[in-house]
Amino acid sequence: MERKQASLFTEFVLIIVGILFLFPVLYLLLMSVKQPGIFYKPLVLPDRLYLDYYSQALNVEFFRSLANSAFVTVGGLGLTILLASMAGYTLARRNGRLFRFVFLLFMTGMIIPTVGSLIPLFKLVNSLHLGNTRTILVILYTAGHIPLATFLYSAFTKSIPRELEESSSMDGCGSFRMYWTIIFPLLLPATGTFILTNVFGIWNDFVTPLIFLNSPEKMTLMPMIVQFMYNQQSVNLGPVFALCVLAMIPLLVLFVFTQRYMLKGLVVGSVKG
């Protein structure tokens, strides 16, 4: 009986915590459909959906900024997965001193603060004449996420039996083909974990695009939303809330399709990593 009561109490506490985490999202959705007359009355609920804010939001080149954010996010994550998965697999399978040193060298990238490296990065980008391009954002995001991704893939590779590689080698499968047809599909949980834990940082990044981009047609979502808010002639924040809701939808869709890989990756990593 006591165990059942403790379980019910735990469930109650988790429900309360879940509501607290969901409250900002629910508040964002509510404010994006409230009529102007009750917009600044937080305790008054709308009696109908007011969608004019969304029509105003779609008139500020939202889809262009959405495409820019999608480009740098997919490019940064995709290139990181391509490079870090191969590096993590190699470092996990080799035990020489050189490979251990390279692994430690990768890990040192995790302790370098991003803000502290912005000034030298800005000078380097300007000297290479790569400023004001979306490509440089992809390169910067890739370089910044490779250490963590390499560590994740290396830890997950250790849970894959070596017998799979030995049997495929005996069947005449080359190293490159063996990796992409046998090993990499087994790393999908690690890939899903990496995507879900890092996509928000790239998608919601405000500082990096603001520093390295100066053309409005190349700007990503977060700087565009802030610039739109400060360029308004009034204090009408309804379209800003609508823009935030629209910017949140792609991440929710991504979470629905990849969360099972993240959960599997966390479980496998905790048991065998």
Image (cartoon, rainbow, N blue to C red):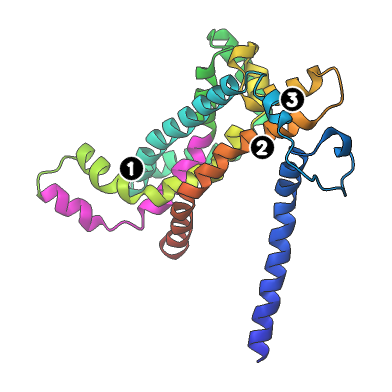
The spot of residue 9 in percent (x, y) is: 71, 77
Q: Quadrant of residue 34?
A: top right
> Looking at numbered disc 1 in the image, what kind of residue is underneath it?
Thr
The spot of residue 184 in percent (x, y) is: 31, 45
Q: Is residue 33 left or right of residue 200?
A: right
- Of all residues shown, which one is farthest toward the bottom? 1
The spot of residue 129 in percent (x, y) is: 54, 7
- State the residue at coordinates (39%, 34%): 83
Q: Which residue is mark 3?
A: 226
Range covered by the magenta-colored residues: 145-170
Closest to the observer: 69 or 30?
30
| Magenta span dominant secondary structure | helix
Counting residues from the start of the chain, the first of labels 3 and 1 encountered is: 1
> Looking at numbered disc 2 in the image, what kind of residue is underneath it?
Val
**Residue 170 image label:** none
Residue 154 within the magenta-colored segment of the rendering: yes
- State the residue at coordinates (63%, 17%): 212
